[in-house]
């Protein structure tokens, strides 16, 4: 079938494009329904203080339990949600839900922090700072307990967009983290100027088994850079004891990874936090 697309232009759909376009359309509908019907869930992965193993906070990680598609990874549906203009609503849901959850857990674990991933589309939304503060107010979670994670590539793509919102949020006590640090191209000047509190060292640097040689040197450099700038460091993707030991030796402040704790359903989080606390007391 051919379709006119603007004056004088004829777009011919090949069969494969038709199938793709159809799936695209149904995915959009499915994501809208997911929001409406409550098909999203959050898992939580502890951020552990490496010096003594104490869980300092949790990162909220979204999952989509689709009745037709099964469990869909955020790696697959977040970019689509961004393209369809649905990410602001989904992101707001994740923020409100995780804030309420962590506010409840803080009755048992008073110092527990919350890390939430934020899309660039949320950051540039004119009411981003309002949206964040509203979610925290509804949940009864103090802003000082919250760290927003933005990826390095988002922050670098439009250095000025969102900067005002980030400064506003910072002045209201919310903390900011650069996720997947080391995979983008942050300039040192920009890092100094951004109101950032934390660098999350991308899993790619940690992943290669024993964390030696060049990887180790790069991670050491990032940790030193963070120390100079007065930022916390979190290592992502710690999968074995050797990596943990190496990172502790470098003075990396915090870590996350399957070796410490997998992303966990909310019902099981308090017992995981308690076990970790007892083990290290
Ligand atoms: P991210 O924020 O960098 O999250 C870390 C990812 O690494 C998570 O994947 C986590 O499950 C995984 N991970 C944790 N420990 C290990 C480990 O030891 N080894 C390995 N191989 N992986 C580990 P996940 O949950 O699939 O999330 C993928 C990405 O989706 C996140 O990367 C984040 O960019 C995005 N995302 C997740 N939830 C949200 C959300 O609520 N909003 C937005 N905008 N993005 C989200
Ligand atoms: Mg993250
Ligand atoms: Mg990350
Ligand atoms: Mg990552």
Image (spheres, rainbow, N blue to C red):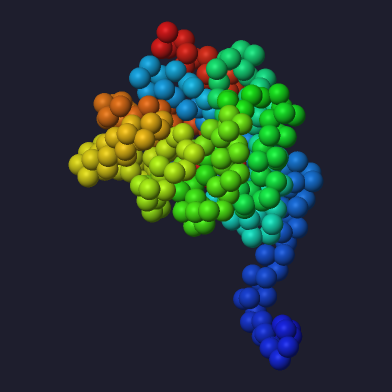
Place of residue 238 in the rendered image (x, y in percent of width and height, measured from the top left): 38, 34
Task: Name the residue: 66% across, 24% down.
Answer: 141
* Residue 250 located left or right of residue 171: left
The quadrant holding residue 146 is: top right
* Residue 84 located left or right of residue 203: right
As drawn, the residue found furthest toward the right would be 36
Task: Name the residue: 63% across, 48% down.
Answer: 122
Q: Quadrant of the N terminus?
A: bottom right
Observer able to see residue 33: yes
Task: Name the residue: 38% across, 53% down.
Answer: 185
Q: Nearer the viewer, residue 124 or 278?
A: 124
Count of numbered tags: 0
Place of residue 67 in the rendered image (x, y in percent of width and height, measured from the top left): 72, 47
Using the image, determine if residue 28 lies above or below residue 99: below
Q: Nearer the viewer, residue 16 or 238?
A: 238
* Residue 4 located left or right of residue 176: right
As drawn, the residue found furthest toward the left would be 213
Place of residue 243 in the rendered image (x, y in percent of width and height, measured from the top left): 31, 32
Q: Quadrant of the C terminus?
A: top left
Q: Nearer the viewer, residue 124 or 59?
A: 124
Task: Name the residue: 49% across, 22% down.
Answer: 56
């Amino acid at each position: 079938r051919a379709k006119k697309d603007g004056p004088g232009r004829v777009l011919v759909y090949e069969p494969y494009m038709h199938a793709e376009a159809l799936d695209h359309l149904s995915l959009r509908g499915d994501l809208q329904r997911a929001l409406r019907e409550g098909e999203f869930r959050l898992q939580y992965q502890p951020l552990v203080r490496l010096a003594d193993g104490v869980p300092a906070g949790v990162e909220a990680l979204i999952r989509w339990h689709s009745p037709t598609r099964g469990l869909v990874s955020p790696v697959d549906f977040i970019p689509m949600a961004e393209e369809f203009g649905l990410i602001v609503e989904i992101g707001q849901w994740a923020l409100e839900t995780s804030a309420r959850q962590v506010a409840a857990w803080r009755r048992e674990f008073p110092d527990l922090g919350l890390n939430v991933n934020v899309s660039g589309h949320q950051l540039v939304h004119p009411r981003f700072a309002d949206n964040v503060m509203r979610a925290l107010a509804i949940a009864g979670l103090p802003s000082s307990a919250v760290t927003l994670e933005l990826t390095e590539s988002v922050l670098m793509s439009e250095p000025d967009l969102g900067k005002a919102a980030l400064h506003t949020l910072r002045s209201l006590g919310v903390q900011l983290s650069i996720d997947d640090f080391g995979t983008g191209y942050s300039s040192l000047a920009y890092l100094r100027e951004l109101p950032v509190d934390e660098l999350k060292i991308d899993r790619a640097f940690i992943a290669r088994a024993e964390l030696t040689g060049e990887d180790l040197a790069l991670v050491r450099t990032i940790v030193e850079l963070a120390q100079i700038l007065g930022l916390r460091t979190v290592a992502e993707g710690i999968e074995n004891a050797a990596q943990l030991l190496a990172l502790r030796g470098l003075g990396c402040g915090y870590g996350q990874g399957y070796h410490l704790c997998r992303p966990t359903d909310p019902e099981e989080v308090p017992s995981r936090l308690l076990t970790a606390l007892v083990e290290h007391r």
